Amino acid sequence: MPDFRYTAVTPGGQIHQGNREAENMGRLSDALARDGLELVNAELRDKKAASRHSRLKMKTADLANLIFQIGIQLRAGVPIVEALRPRAGEDSSKAEGAVRQRLAEMVEQGTPLSQGFEAFPSIFPGYVRNIVKVAERSGSLDQNFIELRDYLEWMDQNWKTFKQAMFYPAFVLGALFIFIFIALRFVFPTVTELLFELDIPLPWITQVMISASDFVVKYWIGILATLFLAPPALRVLFKVSKQAALARDHFLIRIPFLGNVILTLAVARFLRSLILMQKAGIVITDSLAMSREVVGNRVIERSIIRIERAVSNGSTMSSSMAKDSIFPPLVRTMVGVGERSGSLDSSLQAVVDYYDDLLPRKIKAFFAVLEPGLIVFTVVLAGLVAAAVFLPLVNMLSPSAF
């Protein structure tokens, strides 16, 4: 939150100067008015520091550890300022130390912790700030911090598992691209000259490879530039264009086998966040709105928006989900059970426990198909390249065979 240096006057006309944090000038004026002061002027104390704080980032695992440390200390009865303040000898990153020190200062000055989190938007997501805001009102900050830690660790573990699983196919496809590029850029031009000198008939596969080689030789700089620039360009496109991001996510969930894994992971992420919001005491419409932040798939986000609107108009979640095929039947059934029994979080927890067991098996099944598929694809591709080189030579040695 911005820190202002202000000048104000008392009802008696005395000048009063000081420092105070507020969301903006209007909120600062209101806060001073409650203290019997009238704001004259104010300016931000350290704009650069506020900008640095807004850009700070932490890994999900580090954030989970930070939240757990604070929650454990609060449960043990340590005052919140002491729980936030960094201690000498603790193994923490530079970013974590800066965050803890700044939060301790802000809370010591009377700023609620949830507002303090707003100074670090790249570290504390919106759903974390909202849960902490509700927990401050209910007095269950320690319990909510510990539950937040479990949720963040689950998110981090699933993302790491998915990335590790994708490493092998990415490595194989990268090696294939390098092999094809070297063959077309350096090997085939030499082979092409030899074949033209021999003046022998060329099979269609050789003609195709020669055309591809000519294209690569002519435009190889553009091809490499496109491959290097395309990923960041696509990231920017998906960030600024909702339609492009929606089209990407539609494509991803329709990929055979992999799309099923991506969809299951996104639904599990949504359900876990919804459980967390419900346990924190956040109303269902706000819980749905905040859960959208962590889904990571625009197709499901759009479905959640439709459900949120229907619920705000008086419908039940289960009836709204029944009209949307994106959610599996088990989820729709358990949501209905939870709504009828008044224990939505318990019903959803049963689904999440099932998905925790299902996800590793889905990933394993996906790679049981992918790995042999990649091997076959690699062999076929290498065979086509070899055939394009050797078939003309075989044709020259035994023309009667063709």
Image (cartoon, rainbow, N blue to C red):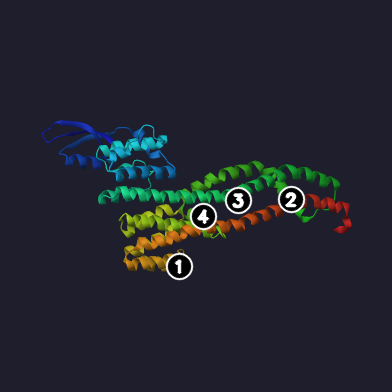
Question: From what the image shows, is residue 114 above or below residue 335?
Answer: above
Q: Which residue is mark 2?
A: 385
- Helix, strand or loop at disc 4? helix
Residue neighbourhood size for the residue with mark 4, other residues' Cα within 10 Å, grouped as few (<14), some (14–19), many (≥20): some
* Of pointers 4 and 3, the one earlier in the residue sequence: 3
Q: Nearer the viewer, residue 291 or 236?
A: 291
Q: Choose the circle earlier in sequence order: 2 or 1.
A: 1
Q: Is residue 363 above or below residue 316?
A: above
Q: Secondary structure at mark 1?
A: helix
Seen at 78% across and 42% down, the residue is: 190
Q: Residue at x 29, y 36 (%)?
A: 105
Distance, label 1 to label 3, CA atoms, is 31 Å
Mark 4: amino acid: Arg
In the structure shown, which secondary structural element does the residue marked by tag 2 occupy?
A: helix
How far is disc 2 from disc 3 in space, using C-alphas?
21 Å
Q: Position of residue 101 (x, y in %)?
A: 33, 35
Residue 169: mark? 3
Q: CA distance from mark 4 to mark 3?
A: 20 Å
User: Which circle marks residue 329 in the picture?
Assistant: 1
